[in-house]
Amino acid sequence: MEIAETTDSRADEHARLLVQVQERQVLLERLAAIQRLIVDRRPIDEILLAVVVAVAELTAADVAVVRVRDPADLDKTTITAAIGCDPVRLALGQEHGLGSGQAAAALARDQVVLCEGPIEELERDFAAAGLGSAAYAPIHRAAKPVAVLCIAATAGRAWDGREEPILRSFAEHATLAMNHAEALEEAAFEAFHDALTGLPNRVLLMDRLARAISRADRLESDVGVFAIDIDGFAELNDSHGHGLGDELLTAVGARLRATLRPSDTVARLSGDLFAVLAEDLTNHAEVETLARRIADALKAPFELGDSETSIGVSIGSATTGASAAERIRNAEIALRRAKDEGRGRHAVYEPEMHGVLAEQRRLEAEMRLGLARGEFALAYQPIFELANNRIRGLEALLRWNHPTRGELAPGQFIPLAERTGLITELGAFVIERACRQIALWRARYPAHTDLYVSINLSVAQLRDQRLVDQIESALRDSQLDASVVRFEITESMLMGDAEESLQLLDRIKAIGVSLAIDDFGTGFSSLRYLQRLPVDVLKIDGYFVAAIGQGEGAEEIIRAIAELAHAFSLEVVAEGISSPEQRRWLVELGCEVGQGYEFSRPLSVESADAFLLSSGLIGEQSTRLAGDRGGELPDPASEPRRASGARGAAGARGPLDPPAPG
């Protein structure tokens, strides 16, 4: 009898162990299946459904659900996966209050909770469905309980202890799935959105644009792309810091979204370049209207930090282009045209713009290569005392000796250099080369005791904090006294952030160099800042010199400028002198110094050296000037007459600027 009982007991134990092994095998199979769904990046709803199906199977529960907490209201949950539920009370997407029941306890304690009747202690939703026992396991996201896996059985069901590890295992896999899904969502968002502004990026814009073009073809409407660039953003970044620049970019994106239609797409393509995709355009007038709306919306000041910042934008638009990439490219080409024509403009793409842009890109590449190959050189135009023809200094002017195009006029490459940022490299080259050359000439011709070199600065250089270091380095390397170097700026260069420019000019002046305002009389701000500017020289623009004797009142303007300069103890230099009559007038009007074709055209280094040699040994001009009609400067004919000088964009003189023709 005892042997039989022992045998039966062992058989029962073996059967129980076999059941456990089988259950464990099923558990591992179900968990492995869920892991495969996660690895295969299946939708999170599909994975959570697999979780509730498996947990209901292995626990023999009548109901299994996943309830996700509402991040905006933690007392609310939404059913995102369910099996065996009442189709009315526990439907997918149904919101349910969390209350203070066992589900809330599981989340609060962050642990598995098992409970059995009576009914009033169970969740109301389960109780209403006729269920009497329930169990809950928290699901985590970023280590915080954000959802709960629930199972329930009919009244009278008692949990036997094996449900807890099963519930916990599936809750952990649900946690893994939710965190994996969130990581994928974040990766997808980052792949298609700009990290700073949260706006769609170029990839997402192109996808939406391709779909919009396809729809427009069927509906016979137009899709417009607007490329928007913040004018002067680089200077704002340099002067106020990238933190404020990032704030501005975010604010611009937000304002664009608030201004445009919900159906329009606002994207950030790069840097300060934004884009707008607008559908259902019917004519050119709508394109112009939308461009004005964009520009007007961005005119109001932005509150950044403790101050207000106002901006302007340039806009290029395109409604043609067979592909999304081509249409965006066309809008960017139009934007380039708008910026070439001046800030704050809107340009509509036209086919001929593409050829112009291609040529500019080729020229930019050749310019970079030419800088590396040493194709750039300096020419020097002598500056004289008007009363006695005594040489005072030389203005350094940049030249590009292109290997196939020949010598290019500055106007052909300086504006492009300013747009691409190459102007700072070219400017640094001019400073270094001019300092080295004037040091050599002063050592070779000591009779020219006050010989100086004048160097033009561009707008970009004046806003480059490296400029002071570049000047100091050039002076140090050439062992040149700072007093023999003069830097020229145009008065229009002060029309942006004047205070910032003044601070940099003070730092440059502290080095010991002299400063000149070039093209005086053509800008708008110099009279306002003249007393504040640390300048030593006013250069009268060649426009007024050319008008002498033409009955336009140029003589009185020049006299007023000279008197104003003398009142501030400034030297007066006249540019563009082309005749003996102009020279005589300028002396009478109070101009001490001048330059122009009446005296000499810009000279190569060799010609300038020969000219200095002709007078440097005895300390005065021994060769008659070309303008005196009695002789020629050494080899002036070797210098071809330039149609234009090395000036940059309008109002922004670059490091290659000669005086006006004549």
Image (tube, rainbow, N blue to C red):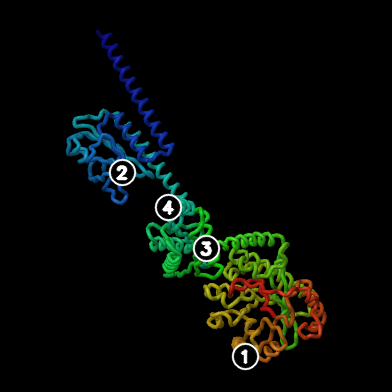
Q: CA distance from mark 4 to mark 1?
A: 66 Å
With respect to residue 98, does 268 lie above or below?
below
Q: At numbered mark 3, what does the secondary structure look like: helix, strand or loop?
A: loop
- Residue 147 in the image, given as x and y percentages of width and height: 31, 42
Going by the numbered disc 4, the residue's amino acid type is Arg
- Residue 358 in the image, given as x and y percentages of width and height: 61, 60
465 or 658, which is in the foreground?
658
- Residue 159 in the image, given as x and y percentages of width and height: 25, 30
Instruction: Kindly tell me whether residue 563 is visible in this rendering.
Output: no
Going by the numbered disc 2, the residue's amino acid type is Val
239 or 511, which is in the foreground?
239
Foreground mark, 2 or 1, reads 1
Q: CA distance from mark 4 to mark 3?
A: 23 Å
Sequence-first disc among 4 and 2: 2
Kindly identify which numbered label has been placed on residue 68: 2
Q: Crowding at label 2, few (<14), some or many (≥20) Cα neighbours within 10 Å? A: many
Sequence-first disc among 1 and 3: 3
Q: Which residue is mark 3?
A: 349
Foreground mark, 1 or 3, reads 3
Foreground mark, 3 or 2, reads 3
48 with respect to 115 (left or right): right
Sequence-first disc among 3 and 2: 2
Sequence-first disc among 2 and 1: 2
Kindly identify which numbered label has been placed on residue 218: 4
Q: CA distance from mark 3 to mark 2?
A: 51 Å
Question: Looking at the image, do the residues carrying marks 4 and 2 touch, with CB atoms under 8 Å apart?
Answer: no
Instruction: Kindly tell me whether residue 489 is visible in this rendering.
Output: yes
